[in-house]
Image (cartoon, rainbow, N blue to C red):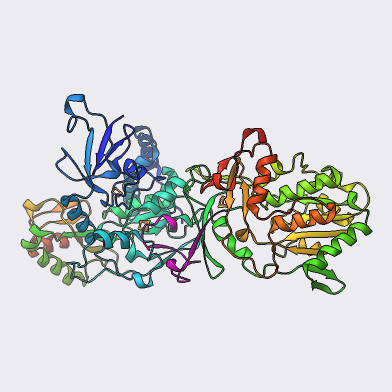
Amino acid sequence: MPLLKIDHQELEVAAGSQVLEAALAAGIEIPHYCYHPALSVVGSCRMCIVEVEGMPKLQTACSTPIGELPADRKVDGKYDMVVHTESEKVVAARKLMLEFLLLNHPLDCPVCDQAGECFLQDYSFKYGSAHSRFIEEKRVRPAEDLGSGVAINHDRCIMCTRCVRFTREITGTDELFVMDRGYSNRIAVFDGLPLDNPLAGNVADICPVGALLLKDYMHTTRVWHLSHTESVCNECASGCSITVDARDNKIYRIISRENPQANGYFICDYGRYSFHKYADSPLTRPLQRTKDGWEMIDWDTAYRQVLEQVQATGGKGAVRALASPTFPNEPNFVLGQFMARLSDRKNIALLPTLKEDDQEFPGGFRISGEKGGNLRGVQAMVPGLAAAMKSLMRGEPGVLIALDGDGRAHLTGELKRLLELVAFKVVVASMPSDLTAQADLVLPVATPYAREGTMTNDKGLVQWLQPALHPAGEVRPDWQVIAELGQLLTGEGHLYTCAGDVTWKINQTTPGYSQITRFRLGRTGQLSGSEAA
Amino acid sequence: MSFAFDAPRTKRFKALVRQYPDRRSLALPLLHMAQDQEGHISRDVLLALAEMLKISPAELFDTVSFYSMFNLEPKGKYLLQVCQTLSCSLAGADLVVDHIGAKFKLKPGETTADGRFTLLKVECLGSCGTAPVVQINDDYYEKMTVDKVGRVLEKLS
Ligand code: SF4
Ligand code: SF4
Ligand code: FES
């Protein structure tokens, strides 16, 4: 393996890897714009220039491969390449490049949404010059709407073409292109063919400057006011890693978080904008159906009701339950546990959720058609969980305890029949939904981005769901509500202290999950064992 | 209004397809053929060619807009392109432009009302030794003076 010396660090790197890749992998930052690990290399921004010993001119680190030198030609007797990233020559050239990129830039950081997370700002601050020698009038162009909720501010664009390569290589939809050349070039869409694909929002994430912007987020806040919570999207079974950006208990945006085991670098627009669904009027208090609508009650009354109804309608043996693939493993696990005690798991089935076709993109990204994001997890949590509800149709009409589908439940004929058949319906939910509309009692739990626990995607990757919001009102955590119901009905059972406590119990008892603990999951998760399958 | 190549050009297209390694590399020859036939590259032409080349209209327009010799707007029957780069400028290209402009009441970039003449100022035509140069459609008219250009235009109009 070639030996690379980069500044004062020695690195062994794979032959053929590029200087920039090797440096980034070793945690050395070389400023760059056009390079993106998921996209082809074009070497156009000239920001990554470095000095390579033995080469007369500065080289672009993103497109300079490292090879092995014959023994007698090694630099200093051992190096295959010696690179300087902060030499006088490099620093001077970088300064010129930045001056060049800023020629027509409006320098409007105070009103730019990218400010605070902008590479143009950061590098200018670190390497740039405080003065421009450009005294001519700046080129000014109006902002444009490119479609799919993305707008472009041409004046800030540095022509790195990341966005163009994204639509060519990742989505294959090819909407963006570079129009005209030289001084007048700009990013454009073809007349009548706007940006139109379900991954479009990513172009704003990968734009290194404030040129491409999400209209949904534009001018709503400043990035330094946001808290960044690393979490998981559960809108489908791909289980993408995300960062949820919130302020004052309100989500402002969701962006992708790099995870080679899950989503790679991107997320889809359904996931990106999904937080809006859960923002308006979530449930805050237990609700009881009365003759003329809903009545708010307290938790004790609610639980007492459940107990009375169970006694009045066929007893504990007639209690049915629906586990939900839109909820984390923890509440489903606890539900499975107490249903095992009540009826040996004969009376628990899977809540049907929406299914569509998978959407695959040329760049390898996949939106799963399985809208119950935690399907694989639920199946592991409740062994023998049947998708069919036949077994639930037998026996006396009793009480049904259902975890909600967060708006993704599929009201199949079978489910509708079950809902008609049971005498009393308890729905554990965060938002009003098709299912809560039919309930007799609604128990409020946190919305998806306020939940804590684990999710298992369709590849078996378990990730930790970090709450980005505090639940409002009298909402309780989902695992707690289920555990409380369990204790109420079985008279025994463990009351957990936190979601991680349930995760630990899962670790102890669930095949395939013996490696899964709150802390081992880290930022990118762990694969559950194959014995789970 | 959709676009299709006429019969001889369709034949030529079929021959070219066999000569090129893949479809997309045929972009420039097809664009020239289309401009030849239509006079300019319209939106319909772009859509039709993109389909023939199996690329998106966006990618094709990327290429088209890079080259100044593709006309995106209809041009006059005679396209008068006067070189305005250094050598031609020093040798009196401005006088030629002014003369043409005065004769047809045109500013550079405009077309006469009867659709016969379009006047353009362009960058280096690569014939500095014979400056000033005017390119009229596909032909070069070299060492132009006001008199000479006047005579050439007489013949055309
Ligand atoms: S809009 Fe952004 S991503 Fe696209 S070329 Fe400009 S700077 Fe690069
Ligand atoms: S692909 Fe699925 S998990 Fe990923 S962001 Fe989209 S909806 Fe969420
Ligand atoms: S990152 Fe190397 S030239 Fe742009």
Q: Quadrant of the N terminus of chain A?
A: top left
Q: Which quadrant would residue A448 be assigned to in this image? A: bottom right
Q: Residue at x 35, y 72 (%)?
A: A110
One can see residue B52 in this view = yes
Q: Quadrant of the C terminus of chain A?
A: top right
Q: Is residue A250 magenta?
A: no
Q: Which quadrant would residue B71 be assigned to in this image? A: bottom left
Q: Which quadrant would residue B151 be assigned to in this image? A: bottom left
- Asked if residue A20 is positioned above or below residue A286 in the image, the reply reads above
Q: Is residue A222 magenta?
A: yes
Q: Where is residue A286 in the image (x, y as percent from the top left)?
A: 76, 67
One can see residue A403 in this view = no
Q: Residue at x 86, y 52 (%)?
A: A319
Q: Residue at x 14, y 41 (%)?
A: A56
The residue lying toward the viewer, choosing from A83 and A387, is: A83
The residue lying toward the viewer, choosing from A205 and A308, is: A308
Seen in the image, is A304 located left or right of residue B136? right
Seen in the image, is A241 located left or right of residue A234? left
Q: Where is residue B41 in the image (x, y as percent from the top left)?
A: 35, 55
- Asked if residue A128 is positioned above or below residue A220 in the image, the reply reads above
Q: Where is residue A248 in the image (x, y as percent from the top left)?
A: 54, 71
- Asked if residue A455 is positioned above or below residue A429 in the image, the reply reads above
Q: Give the range drawn in magenta.
A: A205-231
Seen in the image, is B35 located left or right of residue B85? right
Name the outermost residue toward the top: A71
Query: How many numbered tags mark residues here?
Result: 0
Ligand 1 position by quadrant: bottom left
